[in-house]
Image: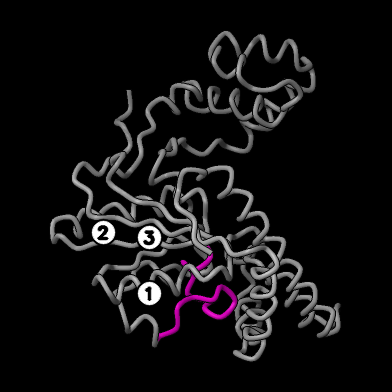
Amino acid sequence: MPPASPHLSQPPLVTLIAGATASGKSALALEMARESGAVIINADSQQLYADLRVLTARPSPNEEAQADHRLYGVADAAEAWSVGRWSRAVLPMLEELSAEGRPAILVGGTGLYFTALTKGLADIPDVPQDVRAAVEADYGALGEAEFRARLGLTDPNAAKSIERGDRQRLVRAMSVQAATGRSLSDWKADTRPLLTPGSWTGLVVEPERSVLYARCDARVDLMIRDGVLEEVRGLLARGLDPALPAMKAVGVRELAAWLAGEMPPHQAIDALKQATRNYAKRQLTWFRNQTPDWSRRT
């Protein structure tokens, strides 16, 4: 059996602040940190990247000077940070703060980061592309019923729990088995949260939707004034793989179209505002579904 995922046995006083983009969660975290002396730790996958301070509305240098901020702008856009890598970076910080008796505030909009902290995520190795392709071919040849039956021989829990017609999850389960020699259900059974249950408090900043959307639009206008176009121009000039997380940040596609002359400025700005509102809506839905027992604040 592989070792269980790391667990924070003696956590510090931890506050988790989640919310959609432009909800005001970062301002709240800073206010709380100034009052308590807490360390603010980034829990937003886009704000990890140094190349995109403006586009991701990362805390300004002035804001960072008002409290200890960590894991902001620490990654190069050429890197691909996963939730596992973020978790491995966060855990030593929490252990250090625990030893010092200092409170921590983790703030961001990436739901999976909060899931890793409070519920845990299985650290499943990546499945090689050739293995997944072979499993996809098997599914096509066998059909769902026979494929599911074969999956049931090695992972009966997955075979029973995956809904009918969910080809993606069936293939995923079989691919993990084929690549690792271990069932997906066994990998998930080893999962433990990074934070001890009962050691943290959770808060979702959730403004009224009309208010949030207005803030999204205002944020885009501010980004344009603050030079986001030049920031994205510099990112595109690096010729990075478009599949990298930084290249898929909200707004890169719309601003790239503006820079390429494929979209007039006003249309690109409107498209960016719409993309930002859509992203905020997805975040709202996720936190409502996944954190129903957390406190709410508008």
**Could one spot residue 6 in this view of the protein?**
no
**What residue is at 53 percent from the left and 12 percent from the top?**
154
- Please report the bounds of the magenta region as a residue range: 46-61
Q: Looking at the rendering, in which quadrant would you find the N terminus?
A: top left
| Image coords of residue 290 (percent x, y) | 54, 43
Mark 2 or mark 3, which is nearer to you?
3
Instruction: Write down the residue under mark 3.
Output: 106
CB atoms of marks 2 and 3 within 8 Å? no
Which residue position holds label 2? 93
> Mark 2 or mark 1: which is in front?
1
Neighbor class of circle 3 (other Cα within 10 Å; few <14, some 14-19, many 20+) is: many
Look at the picture and state if 20 lies above or below 215.
Answer: above
Kind of residue at badge 2: Met
* On screen, residue 240 above or below 94: below
The Cα–Cα distance between marks 2 and 3, rounded to whole angstroms, is 11 Å
- Compare marks 1 and 3 and give the one earlier in the sequence: 1
Q: Nearer the viewer, mark 1 or mark 3?
A: 1
Residue at point 24% right, 72% down? 37
Above or below for 90 versus 251? above
Q: Earlier in the sequence, mark 2 or mark 1?
A: 1
Which residue is nearer to you in this view: 124 or 287?
A: 287
Q: Position of residue 280 (x, y in %)?
A: 64, 61
Lower position in the chain sequence, tag 2 or tag 3: 2
Q: Tell me the SS state at disc 2.
A: helix
Residue 148, quarter of picture: top right
Gap in Å between the C-alphas at discs 2 and 1?
18 Å
| Amino acid of disc 1 | Leu
Q: What residue does disc 1 label?
A: 30
* Residue kind at label 3, given as amino acid type: Leu
